Image (spheres, rainbow, N blue to C red):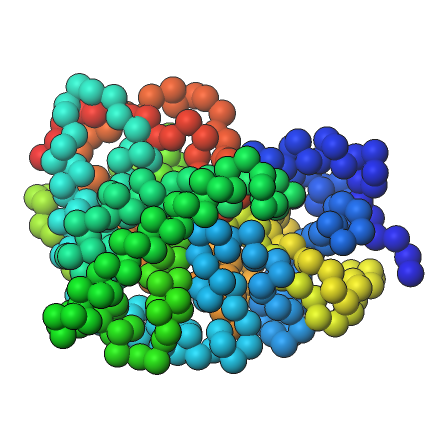
Amino acid sequence: MARLPGPGLIGLPAAGVAGMRRPHELARDLYRRYGHVVRLGLGPASYVYLFGRSANEIILSDRPDSFTWYEAMRVLEPINGPTALVLTDGEDHRRRRRIVQPAFATRRIDSAVPVIVEEVDATIDALVPGTTVDLYSLYRRTVRRIVVRVLFGESLARHADALGEVLEPAIRFVDRPPQFQFRGAPGSGASRRARRAADRVVDAEIARRRGSGDRGNDVLGMLLDTDLGDAELRDQVVSLIAAGYDTTSAAVAWTLLELLRTPYEWERSRDDVTDRLGAGCRVPDGDDLRALNYVSAAVNEALRLWPPASLSGRRASDAFTYEGQLIPAGSIVVFSPFVTQRLPELWGPDADSFRPERWLEHEPEPFSFIPFGGPYRRCLGFALALTEIQVAITRLLQRTTLTLVDAQREIRGTGLSALRPEGGVRVRVGSVL
């Protein structure tokens, strides 16, 4: 069997260092050096990177039964639990997905817009003109409260900040490269304790509802009326909270960062909001958000440049050929939305530029824009995430004037579990309405 292209033994140490904090940059460098197929690592610890639109289509659509998730995504188990949707395959996954999917229907999400607005407005109300704040840190807490309130109700929402605090060690642990996540590694014990602490909070709420007989009119209430076992139920709740705020808060931050460092785009987005909602601060509803074409384009453009999941992986159950290279059965294959969504052949010579107009000019090619994954296992929470981002951006456009601090500094991302802006989004607050 021909050897797959890659850095080999000599290049592994440098690649390992480069990939610890910025795995998306490592992936892009591998593509530029070696092309569409790259092996990184040795033996069973190796990964096969597949780059390009066609690779995404093969993995996400053409061969759904030829790839499994658990072996590639098990690095997320310390926080999500073994029965979370992102870690399961086959009939177990299909059954759990059918149970959870109704929670993310358009009608439910539209009904949640007032809650999202309330939480976003509370964050804006706390801004003090003349001060400097990190909007990423602020909206990380805001999004966490939104996710808990919308999906799991007011009772559990009282524990939203506490859940965030106890989950952080687990999130930091799974944010490391897989080779540093072995049992006994620094942080592994804290990660397990963090998950157990989160389980205790969720278990108490489950017991309270079962004891009172009041299931509640939310996702947890809906899940309590299904055949999910207690462990399955806990894993769905904790994974939805952790993934929901970790990735969505990063997407809010990137959208704000790109708009604020391009004042023309900030003003054009504000004009879009004013045209639809008027010059005041009228609260948007679901129909309003869908009508804000330029704001939606700006959100999509930020997701294109900075997808929250910059890399994802699967295990190949069968051997297959890609770009003339035989990919052996059993390989852990890695694909990269970050790389695909910046390819000049798909996005033009300005592929690295923030240009929302491109979304008003034409639709992207299939599988060239995959910030939420692909068809049969697309992220269930994508519509809720988009709504949260749009509300956050819309209300800031309506109610504030902001100036980006250090606007000329180089923007870099960091993180494996979620790609977030290094250094946050520090702004000077002008006026607040």
Q: Work out whether residue 247 or residue 215 is closer to the camera in this orientation and state it.
A: 215
- Residue drawn at the location 13% of the way across and 49% of the way down: 118
User: Residue 341, image x and y in percent?
Assistant: 55, 50
Return the x and y of residue 269 as percentages of the image width and height.
28, 43
- Residue 317, image quadrant: bottom right
Location of the C terminus by quadrant is: top left
Quarter where residue 161 is shown? top left
Q: Is residue 47 left or right of residue 419?
A: right
The residue lying toward the viewer, choosing from 422 and 268, is: 422
* Quadrant location of the N terminus in the rendered image: bottom right
Residue 64 relative to residue 9: left or right: left
Q: Residue placed at 70% from the left, 45% from the top?
A: 31
Residue 9 relative to residue 222: left or right? right
From where the camera sits, is residue 238 visible?
yes
Rendered location of residue 30, percent (x, y): 71, 42
Task: Name the residue located 48 percent from the left edge and 51 percent from the top edge.
Answer: 78
Q: Residue at x 40, y 69 (%)?
A: 232
